[in-house]
Image: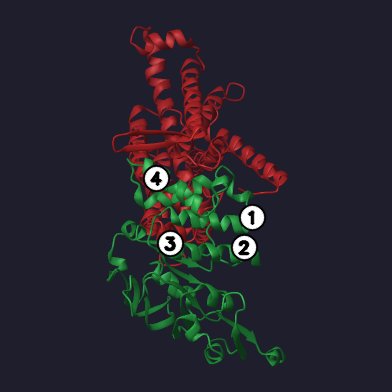
Chain colours: A red, B green
Amino acid sequence: MTVIRLGGYSIRLRHRVLAAVLGSLAALVALAMWSAATGSTSLGLERVWYALIGQGTKGDEFILWTLRLPRLATGLAVGACMGLAGALFQTLTRNPLGSPDLLGLTQGATTGALIAIIVTGASLQTTAVLAAAGSLATGLLIWALTRGGDPSGYRLVLVGIGVSAILAGVNGYLLTRTTIVDAFRAVYWFTGDLSGRDFTQAAAVGTVLAAGVLVIALLSRGLDSLRLGEAAATGLGVHVGATRVTALVTASILTAGAVAVAGPLAFVALAAPHISARLTGSSRSFTVSAVVGALIVTAADMIAVAGVGDRQLPTGVVTGVVGGAYLIWLLIAHRKKGVMS
Amino acid sequence: MTASPLAAREATLGYGRNVISADLTVDIPEGEFTVIMGPNACGKSTLLKALARMLKPSHGTVLLDGKDIHHQPTRAVARRLGLLPQSPTAPDGITVADLVARGRYPHQGILRQWSAEDERVTGEAMEATDIADLASRGVDELSGGQRQRVWIAMVLAQQTPLLLLDEPTTYLDITHQIEVLELCAKLHREGRTLVAVLHDLNQAARYATHLIAMRGGAVVAEGAPADIVTAETVREVFDLPCRIIDDPESGTPLVIPSARARNLV
């Protein structure tokens, strides 16, 4: 435990959290550099550096600035958004499975995307906007349905599962109304992918991320107290209702931003907070969750680009496989330990 | 009646349409150890929740220092009034010192997260509850009685003159019940105003300096234990025929259920 005090400012840093933040950040930087250097054309770090400072060849600069960096930046921001959203949902539901997938936000985004694909024939922008709207609307719907009643995480989970089931039905119906070409596009979209993303999209999701980080910074101490239970948090002077609503809306916006740009990359939001918790111990850290989310998406995207044989894969295929395997491992490990944390 | 830092005024309390108490007026006397008691579903926990601002009256008000508790900033209230809930949850793997430190929340801000004052008060709270030597232990490794002392230490770290405790002895064995009640009595002697919901009538009579007996959502009797723990009141509140004798240890009233009461079952 290290305490830093400077005038009226004081903060307490747990060594383990500090180590987890620095360690995961270092891993992320290393992975990002590796990702920029490798791919179908291997540049190596030296050529990446020259291209980065504008002294590389035309070809190298094109590969770096047009193909790799926008995709890398988008992946980092999307992963961080999902890591934060997952951490918020798990805190709110007090459930280790709390995630945008479980609560129906992903299904809501898919509904929006399907409408866009059917009505507009899959313009990338309309799909993004309607997917974000679908995800946000689902978040608000869940909030409206849980408002007033027992505010426990349990109810939030059940309402979310209900909403998710309804939306899955709607999505199934919408798919039957598409042509085979649109249905293919839709399936491709809800697998989630980062190929062909440019800096505009990176900036959009980056803005959402920045806003989310700001709100979470203000909210995190209250959310920490909420982990003691509603009653204890009220006793400590936390605005329980306001904190929960703000957290739910923030998580929905973060999900919407990520899903709009990359589609619902499966399991990132679920896995990131769990891996983060393994790294930090009892004190949950939103920072580590965000960094781990970015790590998962970047790593998955590198595997996706490498592909199977000479075919690249959609990023979501890899995050799904990696995340699913992780979840099963988690459940088995817990069964062995005989506890569920 | 002495000055009352905390009071309910014609408060209607309940959950949704289910009204538990109507027009309830209660004064918590300053500097006393008040125990609210009564049979199951008499509204005692509901009253405590209302006093702790966890439940907003549908009519009437709860007053803290003479002002509506719901019109005061909740962090300011948290510096006046501490709450030990019935079943708080300790995050997995949290240490004793970290949990007690959570009590400093209403005194902290985003820039002022851990002042020298926070550190001193947290240490004092652990000394007062006799858990200082457990500071680096995990809360989940502790016994029920130790854990309850840790939660009380967290509430003490809030540094509030008023403490509300919702059934602090439930789920504890008799030794730990007495341990927790002795701690409460000590906190009362040091000058704090305590309000607790208790199940055990004899423990209430021994430790409380002021008793509030409830039944059917209403206050049936109120006053010093020696005055109100009588065979008549106990029969009225609990439907229990009994005799009252002097507790040979403390001299407080001791309720002895009548032998024939057993045959009623």
Residue shown at 47% from the left, 27% from the top: A22
Q: Do the residues indicated by labels 1 and 4 lie within the same chain of the protein?
A: yes
Contact check, label 2 and label 1, Cβ < 8 Å? yes
How packed is label 1: few (under 14 Cα within 10 Å), some, or many (20 or more)?
few
Label placed on residue B64: none
Q: CA distance from mark 4 to mark 2?
A: 28 Å
- Front-most of residues A128 and B144: B144
Image side of residue B265 versus residue A286, left or right: right
Q: Earlier in the sequence, mark 4 or mark 3?
A: 4
Q: Position of residue A134 (x, y in %)?
A: 40, 50
Q: Earlier in the sequence, mark 1 or mark 4?
A: 4
Label placed on residue B118: 4
Contact check, label 3 and label 1, Cβ < 8 Å? no
Residue for badge 1: B143
Q: Do the residues indicated by labels 4 and 2 lie within the same chain of the protein?
A: yes
Task: Locate residue B113: give its quadrant.
Answer: top left
Q: CA distance from mark 4 to mark 3?
A: 21 Å
Residue for badge 3: B190
Q: Secondary structure at mark 4?
A: helix
